[in-house]
Image (tube, grey):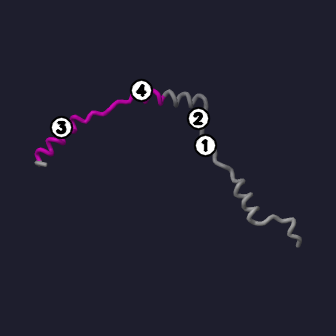
Amino acid sequence: MDSTNYLPLRLVLKQFIMSIAIKNIPVLNEDAAISFDSNAKAAIAKKSSIKFTKQLAVAAKILEKAKI
């Protein structure tokens, strides 16, 4: 059998592995992207801080009662 017509196995495997399709990255299209962007901007504008003054007062009373 003449071996000049055959590729080495490692080259055949390399070509096979390199030909596997790469998964597509999902991308938002026009309307969905605009909607997402406007919702994100609205959420950023609406953000606020949380005040824990009542919880701190309750915790202080508990710790005072426990004498810690």
Amino acid type indicated by mark 3: Ala
Sequence-first disc among 2 and 4: 2
Cα–Cα gap, marks 2 and 1 = 10 Å
Q: Residue at 52% of width from left, 29% of height from top?
A: 37
Cα–Cα gap, marks 3 and 4 = 30 Å
Q: Are marks 2 and 4 in contact (CB under 8 Å)?
A: no
Sequence-first disc among 1 and 3: 1
Amino acid type indicated by mark 1: Ile
Q: Residue at 15% of width from left, 45% of height from top?
A: 63
In terms of depth relative to the viewer, which is nearer, 20 or 14? 14
Amino acid type indicated by mark 4: Ala
Front label number (2 vs 4)? 4
Where does label 2 land, which residue?
Answer: 28
User: Horizontal and vertical percent for residue 19?
Assistant: 72, 53
Where does label 4 land, which residue?
Answer: 45
Amino acid type indicated by mark 2: Leu
User: Horizontal and vertical percent for residue 22?
Assistant: 66, 49
- Label 2 crowding class (10 Å Cα cut-off): few <14, some 14-19, many 20+? few
Cα–Cα gap, marks 1 and 3 = 49 Å
**Residue numbers of the magenta segment:** 39-65
